[in-house]
Image (cartoon, grey):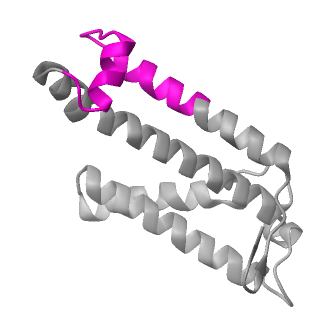
Amino acid sequence: MRSRGLSLRIERRTILVCAILAGLAFLVLVVSLATGDFPIAVRDVIATLFGQGSSRYNLIVLEWRLPRALMALVFGGALGMSGAIFQSLTRNPLGSPDIIGFNTGAYTGALVAIIIIGGGYVTVAIGALGGGLVTAAVVYVLAYRKGMQGFRLIIV
């Protein structure tokens, strides 16, 4: 694929695999919208998604189930992408945040939020995020010498 000054080579197999995975994700999404305490037929779910459902199905599918299912897809994709980025950064197919100490930093941030601030769920989550980010910054600064190399991240 070419666009002005940008050239990108994508193999047909990659496009095919991505299309198949997107189709499977949509299929799983529709099935997840159909299941629950109040089961709905798949054809009724599809009709509701296209604006042809009853008011009861609109409430259940569009208001209650669809936002949760979409967020599950988005967050799952984000976690998968972050794992792939982390593995490529460390050049380690088994790489995970606990190798470098991000988890420990997040735990420490959560403990600081609980003990010092005494906050609730949101405060603990913000403390964990802050602790993880501070740990990531410290490890990155300590490992950076003439460019970033994956093995230096693990050693630090």
Residue 102, position as x, y percentages in the image: 61, 60
Q: Nearer the viewer, residue 77 or 136?
A: 77
Image quadrant in which you'd find residue 148: bottom right
Magenta region includes residue 52? yes
Residue at screen point 60% across, 28% down: 24
Q: Position of residue 139 (x, y in %)?
A: 69, 74
Does the magenta stretch mainly form a helix, a strand or a loop?
helix
Residues shaded magenta:
24-53
Task: From the top left corner, tell me how far across and down residue 31 is, in percent.
Answer: 44, 18
Q: Is residue 72 above or below residue 52?
A: below
Nearer-the-camera pick, 127 or 39: 39
Residue 94 seen in this snapshot: no
Residue 80: x %, y % from top left: 63, 47
Q: Closest to the observer: 105 or 20?
A: 20
Residue at 58% in and 54% down: 103
Residue depicted at x 71% and y 59%: 86
Give the residue drawn at x 48%, y 40%. 73
